[in-house]
Amino acid sequence: MTERLRFTLRQLEIFAAVARTGQVRRAAEALHLSQAAVSQAIAELADALNVDLFERHGREIKPTFAARQLLALAVEPMDALARLPERLVPSSGGVATLSGTIRLAASSTIARYVLPAGLARLRQTHPNLQIRVLSGNSAQAEARVANLEADIALIEGPPQRDDLNIAHWHTDTLQVIAPPGYDVGSIDLAHLNRHAWVAREPGSGTRAVFEQNLALAGHTPPNAHLIIDDSGAIVRAVASGAGLACVSELAAKQASAANPVQFVALAGLSLARPLWRLYRVSTARSDSLLQRFEAELDAALDRPSN
């Protein structure tokens, strides 16, 4: 028989607020409670668990080792329970529709060039579904999932964290581009540093894959003379004569419609790359809304599920 819990979700919520703010007063203000009510909840939780939760340091209180362990264990279940109502998927006419909020972290190329049309089609089919897209580079998207700021991430990779569930999602191709009129015959793998290069910022999946594939082919990645954190802006810079660059083929084709560039083939260099789908390990396959969203998004993008 399962033992009955001796503490409540509300006590955990109050504890988490105190741990984050470092003050009973701030936690009380955030939760619209009296300081006495907050102090009582903390005392009752500490008594139920038979541990000390906080130590006083001047005007602030610091969580003990036991409290830090409790916070790490409690945050994700609390987040899941708080969002439980939106995870309960209603049905209409016998056909289940998606309802609730999905926080989708996506690396910038995916957010800008892959997702928009598919998300628009998905919203037409599921009007009660709210999708919040958080754009950044691949490293930022990974961190958002790990830090509970996003439910799922789609990145250009390669994934760097070992505390997330990682699955192959799709395959993309990178493309080296050059300004109009540039002597592309002078470009070869052994002498890339003879040319000026425009690159994405460190943490970008596009930059990481390009440099990784060059290294695997036995060549040194070129030095970046200009760093821009947006693929579309890179294409515009190359079109204006700033130098060579390597971007997603999707970005190159769409952005070059208004900013003509030359596409450069580099013999001996593989520019295919996988795109990745990431979840937190503990919720990777247990959230029915996420599972259905994943399947519906793949269908909306007209790509098979992996």
Image (tube, rainbow, N blue to C red):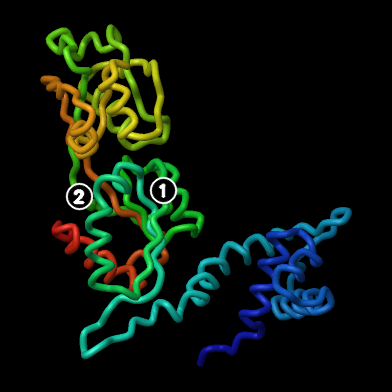
Callout 1 amino acid:
Ala
The answer to whether residue 280 is above or below residue 215 is below
Q: Assign a secondary structure to mark 2.
A: strand
Q: Which residue is mark 1?
A: 141
Q: In the displayed image of the protein, which residue is found farthest to the bottom? A: 1
Do we see residue 208 in this rendering? no
Do we see residue 179 in this rendering? yes
Q: Contact, CB < 8 Å: mark 1 with mark 2?
A: no
Residue at screen point 65% across, 74% down: 12
The CA span between labels 1 and 2 is 17 Å
Callout 2 amino acid:
His
Which quadrant of the figure has residue 208?
top left
Which quadrant of the figure has residue 102?
bottom left
Mark 1, other Cα within 10 Å: few <14 / some 14–19 / many ≥20: many
Q: Position of residue 196 (x, y in %)?
A: 32, 12
Q: Position of residue 192 (x, y in %)?
A: 25, 12
Residue at screen point 20% across, 39% down: 250
Q: Which residue is mark 2?
A: 170
Q: In the displayed image of the protein, which residue is found farthest to the right? A: 58
Which quadrant of the figure has residue 291?
bottom left
Q: Position of residue 224 (x, y in %)?
A: 37, 18
- Residue 292: give its label: none
The answer to whether residue 152 is above or below residue 204 is below
The answer to whether residue 93 is above or below residue 153 is below
Residue at screen point 27% across, 53% down: 115
The answer to whether residue 163 is above or below residue 29 is above
Q: Position of residue 206 (x, y in %)?
A: 30, 34
Name the image quarter holding the C terminus. bottom left
Q: Assign a secondary structure to mark 1.
A: helix
Mark 2, other Cα within 10 Å: few <14 / some 14–19 / many ≥20: some
Which of pointers 1 and 2 lies earlier in the amino acid sequence?
Answer: 1
